[in-house]
Image (spheres, grey):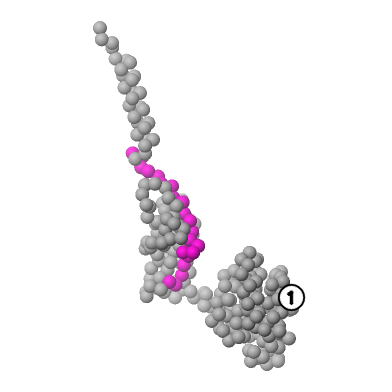
Amino acid sequence: MLTVILLAALGLGPDAPRAVVWLPPSGVLVPGAVGPAGLAEARKLAEQQRYEEAVVEYQRYLGTKDRPAKERAQALYELGFIHLVLGDDATAEERVQEALSLEPKLSPPAGAAQKQVELLARVKKQLSSRARLEVVERQGDDAPNLVRVALVDPDKRVRRVLLRHSLAQTGPFSGTLMRCEADVCVGAIPPPGDSSFTAFHFAEALDEAGNTVATAGTAEAPAQLAVVAQRAWYKSPWVWGLAGAAIIGAAVVVYAASPKPP
């Protein structure tokens, strides 16, 4: 029933491929699979052409953050296709983008309609041309406050990359320009003094107009970096304490070895 409804909504003929195939949690492509209770209810509403109600049920199901990643990706793809049927192309693409962020290898189900296949292909193409930032592992000789990110910029839109940092998890975040060579950018979080500190940070790539085109982390979910201060030896109180003890000890030895007055 849902196949006929979606085919009609998309203006496809009766001989066109299946418009939608629901995906069970196992990932096996089985038409009519129900999945978890909340997801089954959303699919049932879609089968009944109650699309707006189905959207609400999908959103309720997706509101539970501990769902398995592949299961969430499948639900987002289904929700995106319903938005496409409803004529909301922008939201459809956003949902598919979210699905791909959870499951990059997401593919159309067997027998999917051409427009469903095209939706996924279009979003994948958009994502492949976007600038991307990703925090990379530190190298052995890196300073303790240094951050490295990898930059992928197919369209060469990025003009600068900023390291946003704060001593508080909730900000406010300051910006330090990162130095980029080839596809790696490095930046250092300025220490507040000689003492150890914990900082929160994320990276942000900007285009020529100052628009954000990519991030590695966000202000809402920054990465955390603990920096242990390493003072120069001559600044360490332990060094001066030991030096003082050595001087006093030497003085005692000299005094003891000195000839006593007659």
Q: Residue at x 41, y 73 (%)?
A: 211
| Residue 108 percent location from the top left of the image | 65, 78
Kind of element beneath mark 1 = loop
Quarter holding residue 112 = bottom right
Give the answer, above or below, for where 112 lies relative to 258: below
Q: Which residues are magenta?
A: 212-234
Q: Identify the amino acid type marked 1.
A: Ala
**Whether residue 17 can be seen here:** no
Quarter holding residue 39 = bottom right
Q: Quadrant of the C terminus?
A: top left
Q: Residue furthest top?
A: 262
Q: Residue at x 28, y 12 (%)?
A: 259
Q: Residue at x 62, y 71 (%)?
A: 62
Instruction: Count residues near mark 1 (Cα–Cα under 10 Å), then give few for <14, some for 14-19, many for 20+.
Output: some
Q: Which residue is label 1 attached to?
A: 33
Quarter holding residue 106 = bottom right
| Residue 206 percent location from the top left of the image | 40, 70
The residue nearer to you, when weighing 63 against 106, is: 63
The residue nearer to you, when weighing 208 against 192, is: 192
Query: In the rendered structure, does residue 247 fall within the stretch colored magenta?
Result: no
| Residue 203 percent location from the top left of the image | 44, 64
Q: Quadrant of the N terminus?
A: bottom right
Q: Residue at x 37, y 47 (%)?
A: 194
Horizontally, residue 123 falls left or right of residue 138, namely: right
